[in-house]
Image (spheres, grey):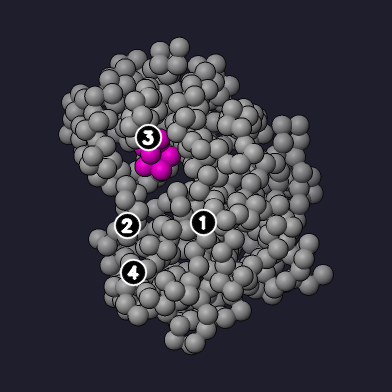
């Protein structure tokens, strides 16, 4: 069977989109046809391209259940481009009028925005470059310049489909695109605002990093694949059904929830899944646990995460037909799946970009309502302990975060936990100026317990 012609370009072709978006699109094409093949774009490294090229862009999707695994060959990719090697090829692919959708999984930091406000970070080095060069380096720059090419050619814009864990992700990417476009050409920004579409989405599938052990295990079963993807059986995708000209794959046939407003889905997932994932990543890592499954297998953290959900649920409006306690119970079962080796260090990455959406919004709502949030507060304090770059045994931590050097420098200038808290709360990119003073007392108290007794004992005390 021949592959579908390209109708989608995806920026940030990592394991998550190959384990999630590509699978849904393949199912939609299988169900209803259409030219919805995908060109993937690696914005940094050629590793994925190099691994897939010898396989004609096909790869194995491995669903890891608690009782076994299932494999499936995915053949929806038509090419993989590497942006630093040939940025013009990427722009030309995006500018092709046959391409109707440009989707993104570039992580929170890839939007070159200020997490606390959602606004474009005009001082970001990549933004500064893209404002003055026709050939961009950032994902936002590629979107703006490709849309500029479409307008110049008299073609309709593509739909921009964010698949990253940001609240109102479509609105965020629309905002940064319009801001950058207005600085380049106000008429371009007006055209994008009028003709473009930026639907919000909620994506959910736990996708641990593929290891050499995973590749070797498949080879022993006769599947030779240099770039398989591992994921849990569960998957959920909710999309605001708002596409340029209505052009999209038959995603509903693939199980996607096409809705008029995705806000309730994304808020539930960001706060109840991503929020607890981050909390478990920092506290679990400090306590010496390698994976989320290991962490919730510890009775202390199993109790801690249940108390976390009890704090979070009052600040979440359930989507129609969803019972939040049942959702939390299902999340725990997913976290405890022993086949999913989702490492705490992987989830801990880029915390300065994640905290505002995953934890701080809930904290603000609870504070405004007069609700105590000791488990959420502990998670913030654990992040602060983590980004000092030294673990509880005195060993160095490989902190991977856009602000890592600045955070470490701020912490290095402090002698006590309360000084660390005060210094880190001063990062307005993370903590809004009106929220930081309200957090100072409770986060300092939690930090002092972590520094003195360790994260596990702190979690045990708070979750009693």
Left/right placement of residue 6 relative to residue 87 reads right
- Residue receiving disc 3: 365
Left/right placement of residue 238 relative to residue 193 reads right
Residue 119 numbered tag: 2
The mark closer to the camera, 3 or 1, is 3
* Rendered residue at 78%/72% (across/down): 2
Left/right placement of residue 306 relative to residue 403 reads right
Q: Which residues are magenta?
A: 356-363
Which comes sooner in the sequence, label 3 or label 4? 4
Residue 235, can we see it? yes
Which comes sooner in the sequence, label 3 or label 1? 1
Locate residue 326, reporting x and y percent. Answer: 63, 29
Q: Are marks 1 and 2 in contact (CB under 8 Å)?
A: no
Foreground of the two, 214 or 193: 193
Locate residue 184, reporting x and y percent. Answer: 31, 76
Residue 409, can we see it? no
- Residue receiving disc 1: 200
Q: CA distance from mark 4 to mark 1?
A: 20 Å
* Rendered residue at 28%/67% (across/down): 128
Which comes sooner in the sequence, label 1 or label 2? 2
Provide the secondary structure element on which disc 2 rests. Answer: loop
Locate residue 300, reporting x and y percent. Answer: 50, 16
In the displayed structure, 44 sits above or below 150; it is above
Q: CA distance from mark 1 to mark 2?
A: 17 Å
Q: Are marks 4 and 2 in contact (CB under 8 Å)?
A: no
In the displayed structure, 150 sits above or below 242; it is below
Q: CA distance from mark 3 to mark 4?
A: 31 Å
């Amino acid at each position: 069977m021949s592959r579908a012609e390209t109708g989608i370009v995806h920026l940030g072709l990592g394991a998550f989109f190959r384990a999630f978006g590509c699978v849904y699109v393949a199912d939609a094409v299988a169900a209803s046809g259409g030219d919805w093949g995908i060109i993937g774009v690696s914005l940094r490294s050629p590793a994925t391209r190099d691994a897939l090229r010898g396989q004609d862009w096909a790869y194995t999707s491995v669903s890891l259940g608690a009782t076994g695994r299932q494999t499936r060959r995915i053949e929806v990719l038509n090419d993989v481009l590497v942006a630093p090697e040939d940025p013009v090829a990427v722009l030309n692919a995006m500018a092709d009028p046959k391409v109707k959708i440009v989707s993104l999984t570039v992580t929170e930091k890839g939007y070159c925005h200020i997490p606390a406000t959602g606004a474009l970070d005009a001082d970001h080095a990549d933004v500064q470059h893209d404002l003055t060069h026709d050939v961009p380096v950032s994902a936002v720059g590629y979107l703006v310049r490709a849309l500029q090419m479409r307008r110049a050619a008299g073609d309709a814009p593509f739909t921009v489909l964010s698949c990253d864990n940001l609240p109102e992700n479509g609105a965020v990417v629309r905002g940064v695109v319009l801001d950058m476009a207005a600085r380049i050409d106000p008429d371009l920004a007006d055209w994008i605002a009028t003709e473009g579409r930026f639907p919000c989405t909620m994506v959910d599938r736990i996708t641990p990093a593929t290891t050499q052990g995973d590749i070797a295990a498949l080879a022993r079963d006769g599947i030779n694949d240099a770039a398989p993807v591992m994921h849990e059986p569960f998957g959920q995708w909710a999309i605001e059904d708002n596409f340029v000209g209505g052009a999209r794959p038959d995603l509903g046939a693939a199980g996607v929830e096409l809705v008029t407003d995705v806000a309730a889905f994304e808020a539930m997932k960001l706060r109840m899944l991503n929020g607890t994932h981050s909390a478990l990543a920092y506290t679990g890592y400090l306590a010496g646990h390698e994976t989320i499954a290991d962490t919730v297998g510890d009775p202390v953290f199993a109790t801690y995460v249940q108390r976390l959900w009890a704090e979070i649920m009052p600040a979440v409006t359930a989507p129609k037909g969803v019972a939040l306690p049942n959702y939390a119970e299902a999340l725990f079962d997913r976290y405890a799946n022993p086949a999913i080796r989702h490492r705490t260090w992987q989830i801990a990455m880029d915390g300065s970009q994640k905290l505002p959406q995953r934890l701080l919004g809930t904290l603000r709502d609870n504070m405004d309502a007069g609700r105590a949030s000791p488990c959420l507060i502990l998670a913030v304090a654990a992040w602060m302990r983590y980004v000092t770059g030294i673990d509880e045994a005195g060993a160095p931590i490989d902190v991977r975060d856009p602000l890592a050097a600045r955070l470490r420098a701020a912490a290095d200038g402090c002698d006590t936990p309360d000084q660390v808290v005060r210094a880190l709360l001063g990062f307005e990119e993370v903590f809004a100026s009106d929220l930081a003073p309200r957090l100072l007392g409770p986060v300092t108290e939690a930090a002092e317990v972590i520094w003195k007794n360790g994260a596990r004992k702190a979690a045990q005390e708070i979750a009693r």
